[in-house]
Image (cartoon, rainbow, N blue to C red):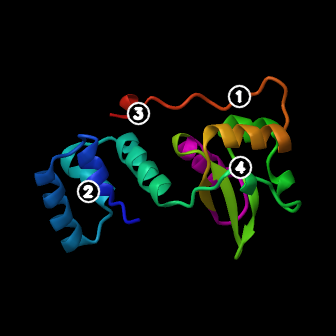
Amino acid sequence: MDVRLGHILVAQGSITKVQLHQALEIQERTGMPLGAICEQQFGLSGAVVEAAWATQYAKQAQHVDAGALAPSSDVRELVSNRRAWQFGVLPLGWDDGALRVATTPDLLLRAHRFVAGQLPGPAFFVMATRTDLESALQCWYSLPGAQLPAPPDQRQAA
């Protein structure tokens, strides 16, 4: 599924179709990332662009069901129980040298920041439902009373 960042920004009302066309013309001339152009040209905040990126990534990522949410033994210790719950991450295993990590679409930004800053090597995300991720975390990263963070309010980003 090909989901374009610019179309997401238009759909969420962050830019107009005319602005998207202008940004794409600038991108063609300069090679700059579309998000950076929208920040510079139209005053979008980085948070708005990040939220649109997360939407794009989540729509394009593989979605997995509960049966696929079991970490391999070589990645289980990469994340403490507290951090797994705090950041909504479940490392699943290595795939061609990249760490495969499950999270939910609404926690993707939080999970990405944690993984990029705290875990070794490249990583990519697969999407799970909150219910499936919570069940898997209860199984593999048990922490009495733990809950996934509340979904961020997307309106705050705008």
Tell me: 37 left or right of 118.
Answer: left
Q: Is residue 59 above or below residue 24?
A: above
Q: Residue at x 20, y 45 (%)?
A: 15
Check contact, mark 1 vs mark 4: CB within 8 A.
no
Identify the secondary structure beneath mark 4: helix
Percent of width and height locating residue 71:
80, 56
Query: In the image, residue 103 lies at what x, y percent?
Result: 63, 47
| Quarter location, residue 29 | bottom left
Asked if the stretch drawn in magenta spans residue 120, the answer is yes
The CA distance from mark 2 to mark 4 is 39 Å
Of badges 3 and 4, the one in the foreground is 4
Q: Is residue 97 magenta?
A: no
Say above or below: 127 vs 94.
Answer: above
Label 2 and label 3: CA atoms lie apart by: 21 Å
- The residue pinned by badge 4 equals 66
Q: Is residue 103 left or right of residue 52?
A: right
Q: In the rendered image, which residue does mark 3 sit on?
A: 154
**Residue for point 36% across, 29% down:** 155
Residue 107 lies, in percent from the top left, at 57, 41
Instruction: Classify mark 3: residues with Cα within 10 Å, few (<14), some (14-19) or many (20+).
Output: few
Which amino acid lies under the numbered mark 2 shown in the image of this protein? Answer: Ile
Q: Which residue is labeled 1 in the image?
A: 147
Q: What's drawn in magenta, residue-wise?
A: 107-123
Decide: few, some or many residues near mark 2? Use Cα within 10 Å; few <14, some 14-19, many ≥20: many
Most extreme residue toward the left is 18
Identify residue type, mark 1: Gln
Residue type (three-letter) at the residue carrying disc 4? Ala
